Image (cartoon, helix red, strand yellow):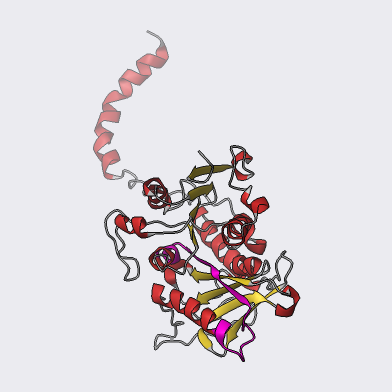
Amino acid sequence: MTQSWKSLIAALPLLTQSLPAVAQTAAPAPAPAAKPAPFAPFGGITLDQARDVEGDLIRDAYAGMPDMPGTGPYPAIREVSPTLADHVVYRPRDLAAMGGKKLGVLVWGNGGCRDDGAAARMHLMEIASYGYLVVAPGGNFSGPGATPRAKGADGRPIVTKTTHAQVLAGLDWALAENRRKDSPLFGRIDEKAIAASGHSCGGIQALAASTDPRIATTIIHNSGIFNDLRAVNGVALEKSHLQKLHAPILYVMGGPTDIAYDNGTDDYRRIKHIPAVLVDINVGHGGTFRSLLGGRAAQIDIDWLEWRLRGDAVAGRSFTGPVCRLCTQVDLRVQKNMIDPQ
């Protein structure tokens, strides 16, 4: 045994005697480790915060966009008519420029059934520029020149909901103006070229309104009837309501991330008695309403309206034939029923 080991063994009694003293003077337990900071790659904020900021930025950017007159042959405006103060109207600025061509009419249901008739202004002005009178319920609460909302006792803006009766009130007004001799719209409306449309909750309003015999076609955006008879802003439609529809219908959905995807695609599958098309754009529930000029959905709507209301076969090629224009676009999914000759 080496001298170093002998020295260690000899020291063991002394080490053993010192153990209690060591225990009495042990260091305090370490404090729990601090939780790691959330992963924050976006300038020091979390992913959820970044999404919130992105949403606010998109809303703010959209609110600040100037009104666009549209790409159609009749530059459009939006206005509040003195004879229809609780709706927003979109129409060609110069009605005389249309010559003998008549206005088609589109009545609109706002997203969320909110009382903002200017919420989809880009989309609706683009449609109006092709020679349509578009009427949306609610005030002029979005975009340049927006009317400030009244505020409640808590200081927050007062936001109310619209009804499908208000959607149809826009149609009643348009037809009355067409017959009123001192109206700028007198004699300018084709009373057979009438469509109903809407987004999300407003799509349910459009479906409710579309049993009206005056409606010649319907366009539903990111919407569909619930299977559980759930009421949407006071309207509880059953799936059997679809069998009451009498005119061709177009569904424009936002892909699997669209919260209304299952409802809308199920609606389409159930509709066998009228011409129907479903176009799926993989953009989510918000559609393309905040895009410049209403984005892709607006152009799809215009082709549908030009075809179904004005008989424009060139516009109809977006939907007709085995190689329809929309059918050949790899990022779209198109389904059709009773559209092409059998």
Quick check: 4 left or right of 83? left
Q: Residue furthest top?
A: 1
Which residue is painted at 39% across and 89% down in the image?
153
Q: Quadrant of the N terminus?
A: top left
Q: Report x, y in % for residue 131.
A: 66, 69
Give 269 or 124, whichever is nearer the viewer: 269
Q: Report x, y in % for residue 294.
A: 62, 62
Q: Quadrant of residue 122?
A: bottom right
Eyeballing the image, is 92 above or below 85?
above
Which residue is painted at 53% across and 48% down in the image?
279
Q: Is residue 202 magenta?
A: yes
Q: Which residues are magenta?
A: 177-204
Give 152 or 204, whichever is nearer the viewer: 204
Eyeballing the image, is 156 above or below 35?
below
Give 67 or 315, whichever is nearer the viewer: 315
Q: Report x, y in % for residue 77.
A: 67, 77
